[in-house]
Image (cartoon, helix red, strand yellow):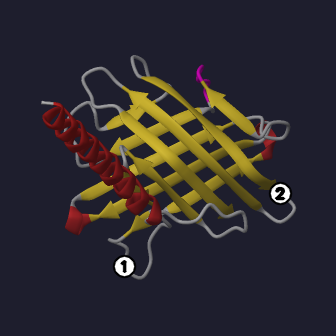
Amino acid sequence: MKNKFFFAFVLLAVMLSSSTCKKQNTLEMELAKLPQATQTGQNTFGCLVNGKAWVAQNADCFPYCDPSFKMYYDSEFGGNIRVQAIFKDSKRNIDQYIGLGVDSTSSKISFTFTEMREHMGFTYENNRMENNCKIIKSLNTPSTAQGSLVLTKYDLQYGIISGTFEFTLYKPGCDSIKVTHGRFDKKL
């Protein structure tokens, strides 16, 4: 009888560790698809969206088109930063957008988003959706959001702004959007 319990315990332990290893391997594989978190103006943007790699790119881009990653800095209004990234690939039926915004960056480099203001927040847009879940913005009620953004490099002399971010957006009737391991590195 003891042997049966021991065998069942060992089998359960092996199954649980196998499941944990698979989740860890999947996370590592998705993280490997993201650009490195650099601070040299590499013009990169990437994150995990609900556990899947999301890298700014426009596969539909013929010789000339808008860049897939843009950043705007406005010192006139206290150091506002707007980050805009697209992930577009018609062959894979993907047309998505992520936007980040912060203000008063001249004196602050770490932002926690619990209370959103006009120039601070997150946006996720999936243009392949046909319902009211197409756009979820942290500023729009009844959406809820929480997250953070850390500027890891804020060098206006050399025109480089880099950072890391994560956020969760929820809108009633829609799936939650959970963004983790976000990073960007932009030469203005």
Q: Would you say the residues marked 1 and 2 are in contact, meaning their CB atoms lie under 8 Å apart? A: no
Q: Secondary structure at mark 2?
A: loop
Which of 42 and 97 lies nearest the eye of the viewer?
Answer: 42
- Quarter of the picture containing the C terminus is bottom right
Task: Tell me residue 143's x, y (percent).
Answer: 41, 22
Disc 2 residue type?
A: Leu
Label 1 or label 2, whichever comes before in sequence order: 1
The boundaries of the magenta stretch are 114-118
Disc 1 residue type?
A: Phe
Q: Is residue 152 above or below residue 1?
A: below
Left or right: 117 with respect to 158? left
Residue that label 2 marks: 156
Magenta stretch: includes residue 117: yes
Q: Residue 126 falls in which quadrant of the image?
A: top left
Left or right: 169 with respect to 15? right
Which residue: 50% across, 67% down?
Answer: 67
Q: Secondary structure at mark 1?
A: loop
Which residue: 46% across, 47% down?
Answer: 98
Q: Is residue 6 above or below residue 58?
A: above
Residue 62 disc label: 1
